[in-house]
Amino acid sequence: MNLHLKVWRQKNPATKGALVSYEARNIPEDCSFLEMLDLVNEDLLSRGEEPIAFDHDCREGICGMCSLTINGIPHGPSETTTCQLYMRKFKDGQTIYIEPFRASAFPLLRDLAVNRSAFDRIQQAGGFISAHVGAAPDGNAILVPKTDADHAMEAAACIGCGACAAACPNASAMLFVGAKVTHLAALPQGQPERERRVLAMVRRMDAEGFGNCSNYLECEAVCPAEISTTVIGQLNRDYAHALAKESL
Amino acid sequence: MSLNLDSKTPSGPLEKKWEQHKFESKLINPANRRKFEVIVVGTGLAGASAAATLGELGYKVKAFCFQDSPRRAHSIAAQGGINAAKNYQNDGDSVHRLFYDTIKGGDFRSRESNVHRLAEVSVSIIDHCVALGVPFAREYGGLLDNRSFGGAQVSRTFYARGQTGQQLLLGAYSALNRQIAAGSVEMFPRTELMDVVLVDGHAKGIVTRDLTTGAIQTWAADCVIMATGGYGNVFYLSTNAKGSNVTATYRAHRRGAAFANPCYTQIHPTCIPVAGDHQSKLTLMSESLRNDGRVWVPKKKGDTRASSQIPEDERDYYLERKYPSFGNLAPRDISSRSAKEVCDEGRGVGPGGLGVYLDFADSIKRLGEDKIRERYGNLFDMYHQITGENAYHGPMRIFPAVHYTMGGLWVDYNLMSNVPGLFVLGEANFSDHGANRLGASALMQGLADGYFVIPYTIGNYLAPQVGKRPTTDHPAFKQTEAEVRANIHKLLSIKGKRSVDSFHRELGLIMWDHCGMARTEKSLTRALKRLPELRQEFWQNVNVPGENESLNTSLERAGRVADFLEFGELMCLDALTRKESCGGHFREEYQTPDGEALRNDEEYSHVAAWEYQGEGNAPIRHVEPLTFDNVKLATRSYK
């Protein structure tokens, strides 16, 4: 198949960027979206041009490193990551707009690559259980009902890609933060630090410049890990509870 | 030059060695730990757990990864599970059985002492991960659930759906984050190791490149830990992440670290077959699928009927037929080779005949589609996404692909290489899996090394090193940095015609055809002739556009491919000189009449550790003999 691409090119954060047109020719439909960009890049290289920079690593939908806003939708028109999007989802002759994930807390690095370290800093604020090596009781000493373990797992499946914030008109990271808060709140091991955790993570999230949730639910729609917005409800409840207790 | 390959294996009975060694290891008091700086390169299971644990103990740690976040490391992609000798299922498991299975699974080519330690600490890993909040699968009663895995007859594998690696890595990442917040670990993402700096023969620092700005920096420390994963991408197509590379370990090799058993590569039996020339990587379907899937091909050659049109009695469930006691759970190397055999016979399925069926029809009939969905839903979704086929309605097509590399930098019992101060953890070292790794053992080893081994053994090196840390003003740092800059300049100034990727693809094909699932003296000799030619062409004709001072993905890849081009030769040389078949290393000349790997214990019961001799010179093969006092060397049988 042949495609008309409009790709965001920007040499570095200091220069201005623009959409540049490229033709992608003879693309097999069994190709993944990133393999299509590989082919375009090989073509650019053969013409002595610099390839399009984009983030990617595992190419199997789990590492969360790939991004791209495709025709206005983070990760494009499928329920997965960009790396698991296959060209059979597109039509021959179609025009495809390819832009970076856009959120002020994700500063652009080059072309389609952005800096998502703000997510790491939110996790550093409190997304952990303080258990030091060597002190743990036997794994079966802590019984966890299967439904709770399943609930924790569903939230823990977040891959930290940032599509939620990129899709949200407020650039809210509440799905991402809610996922970690919900994962650890669902487990007995997570209880001792539950209140500290939610306060620290929400404050860090605000400080990084992410917005608040106003129920657009775009985040859930684009999330490749199928994290439900119920985690945002959990986040709000836990935050309100912790805040009230803190003010006592 | 002589190479010190003293394994420092403690004396005493096998099951007491680790305890005794921990007692005899040097302790460093908390006040002194603060004075030591430790560099950790790589933040997968081994690196993240090591950095977090050393930070927790009070060492000053600097951690580096080339990805944009430590959470991206390729450990995250491991699906199936992690082994531990808990015997929660009361099915006869024990530390000794896990030890024995791992030694046997590795085809008797690993060190008894290291493997036993691994089995011992496996139980603590599960406890610690539970404490960190890893959401392992549970039974209704709230107890931890287990599943069985290839190469074992007990259920000792703990799992978190099909995302065990992800959950274990995120656990280690959370522990790392706690230390970053506490100020004991400083994290440098998007920063790639370019070289190791040796001062008076000790590893005392590294040179890095900031992948966004191109800044070349030097870092001094009291010791360097490498946890940089395996070298499977030498084949271009593998299940590894695109960024996975051999650069860190190979550059260390060039500085004197011995590379052990590079020819031991694991070909995973259950991957999605190649779809075309555009393919950039291969995707693994967890081996756990073999618990409920049955592997088969048509009995007839060139049978092009759809799978549903082939009646039961015209199907060959070849693993069940050849290995009745292990059946579809035969170890990886055996399953892969059997798939190659039936495809070579012309009985493969799918495009090009390079595939076999993995069929869930019987399990769906027995357990219902919902149960199968609960166990493997994400894998079936992934299969659908990639191939466009629904595996609930028809069998999957699978084919073997390069997945894991057992070889790596040589390390002693303390996980230190022959270069003092250079420690190597996880897949990057050679230590625990011999010639073949069992499923669900990589996660175990990564976390064992990082959480439970290095925190004890590092003291043996560091204790006498107080006050010996050089500064980056030392001439060795200046010299190494200058060499790194010169190398980058050279890559950028060639301005040739061929892209980095085209060289990498060609290298991968040479390696797959000549040093892949089956090797011969002829194929390896041919590769050893072809590789230097390709390398020469690379250095004359590679096209690396742009400059160093920006995010330049071509430049990043060029450096890695340059190292792969040299490393491929070392692999072939190792495969050529190991004149036996064992585990993942199958030399066609050495097989039993029924096609099984034929070891030669008299001559090859040893580790081959290669010493670098400078560009263009043949490396020297050194040997660490392997002794087996606790298991009887036997022909591996899964029949």
Image (cartoon, helix red, strand yellow):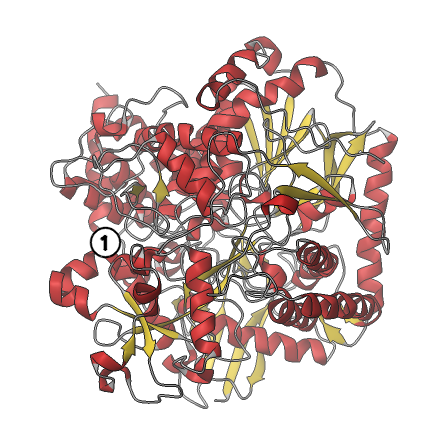
A61 in relation to B259, above or below: below
Left or right of residue B467: residue B72: left
Residue A146 spot, x, y in % from top left? 15, 41
Given residues A62 and B615, the one toward you in this image is B615
The amino acid on which the numbered mark 1 sits, given as a three-letter code, is: Ser
Residue B470 spot, x, y in % from top left? 78, 23
B91 in relation to B519, above or below: above
Q: Rate crowding at label 1 as few (under 14), some (14 to 19) or many (20 or more) other CA atoms within 10 Å.
A: some
Q: Quadrant of the C terminus of chain B?
A: bottom left
B214 in relation to A22, above or below: above
Residue B56 spot, x, y in % from top left? 48, 22
**Residue at image x 36%, y 30%?**
B95
Left or right of residue A156: residue B263: right
Q: Is residue A60 visible?
A: no
Residue B458 spot, x, y in % from top left? 60, 23
Left or right of residue B453: residue B253: right
